[in-house]
Image (spheres, rainbow, N blue to C red):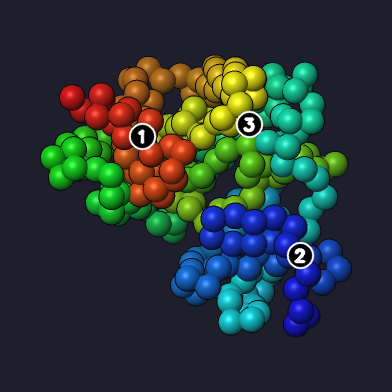
Amino acid sequence: MSKLDKPLAVGRTAEIYVWEDGYVLKLFLEWCPVHWVEREAQIASAVTQAGLPTPRAGAIVEVEGRHGLVYERVQGISMLEAFNRRPWQLVKLARILADLHVEMHQRSLPDLPSQRAGLERAIRSAPALSEDLRAAVLQSLAHLPEGDRLCHGDFHPDNVLLTPEGPTIIDWMTAARGNPWADVARTCIILSAGALPERPLARWLLESARRWVYRIYLRRYQAAFPDSNGQLQAWLPIQAAARLNEDIPGERQSLLQFVQTAFA
């Protein structure tokens, strides 16, 4: 296939296109190096072999000067879209999100990159952090337990597809070997810190819905893995500092304030 149609979805690092029958192409943006694509292909293969529900990855291809990864196409909508279409299913969907995370964290893939190393790189590069605050965050990170569990690194409702065969996890680009509570903290930051609409009513509705999702997800997860040592609270400011490296305008100020308060 040489000509691409309108993308099915657009993300911060890639676009999704219809490919051949039964497949889609995740085509990375021009600035993304090819080793990102190669790494995702290796991780996707390992995750599939581990038995987690995820689309099978195929060949790496080059289209219009950009590199991409072919995946089998799964039919369904994202969990985020399901929240919008069927808000009465919020409790059920939030529990599914937690159950998938529990299932993931029961597995260990020792050949994956280090979660701690990835967080350290992100924190060192985060433009909003002062040098004193950066040093405090890195010192805290150095004292937290590393772990050897399979962690997604960007697990949230938009990276879960609801299909006729069941929920499927996508976008393993940031997967790593690490501490599951660090992975939960990343999810909690995303569920609580995302930018909100400016319109008051829409803002109130979305903020209320995500607060419920946060609570139900976390309660369900902790029922399986009790946080007896208070690890989540220790990891939250670490993940907030690391996310500042993504420099998302609608989140920057709230994340920075959270980190500053945690290390005041």
Circle number at residue 97: 3
Using residue 230 as the reference point, say whether residue 22 is left or right of it: right
Q: In which quarter of the image is residue 99?
A: top right
> Nearest the camera: 73 or 176?
73
Residue 52 at x, y percent in the picture: 65, 46
- Picture coordinates of residue 250 (x, y %)? 46, 38
State which quarter of the image contains the C terminus.
Answer: top left
Q: Residue 84 at what x, y percent from top left?
A: 73, 30
Badge 3: residue crowd in 10 Å (few <14, some 14–19, many ≥20): many
**81 sits to left or right of 127:** right
- Give the mark nearer the N terminus: 3 vs 1: 3
Q: Which amino acid does label 2 sit on?
A: Lys
Label 2 or label 3, whichever comes before in sequence order: 2
What residue do we see at 28% from left, 54% from top? 125
Question: Residue at position x 61%, y 26% from top?
Answer: 199
Which residue is drawn at the image coordinates 36% and 44% (left, top)?
244
Along the line of sight, the residue nearer the viewer: 104 or 55: 55
Q: What residue type is labelled 3?
A: Leu
* Separation (CA) of disc 2 from disc 3: 30 Å
Name the residue tied to disc 2. Answer: 6
The answer to whether residue 147 shows anywhere in this view is no
Farthest left residue in view: 132
Say which mark, if any, is on residue 253.
Answer: 1
Badge 1 crowding class, 10 Å Cα cut-off, few under 14, some 14 to 19, many 20 or more, is: some
Is residue 27 positioned above or below 188 on the image? below
Residue 154 in view? yes
Q: Residue furthest front?
A: 199
Q: Is residue 59 left or right of residue 238?
A: right
Q: In this view, does 248 lie above or below 66?
A: above
Ranked by sequence position, the earlier of labels 1 and 2 is 2
85 left or right, relative to 103 = right
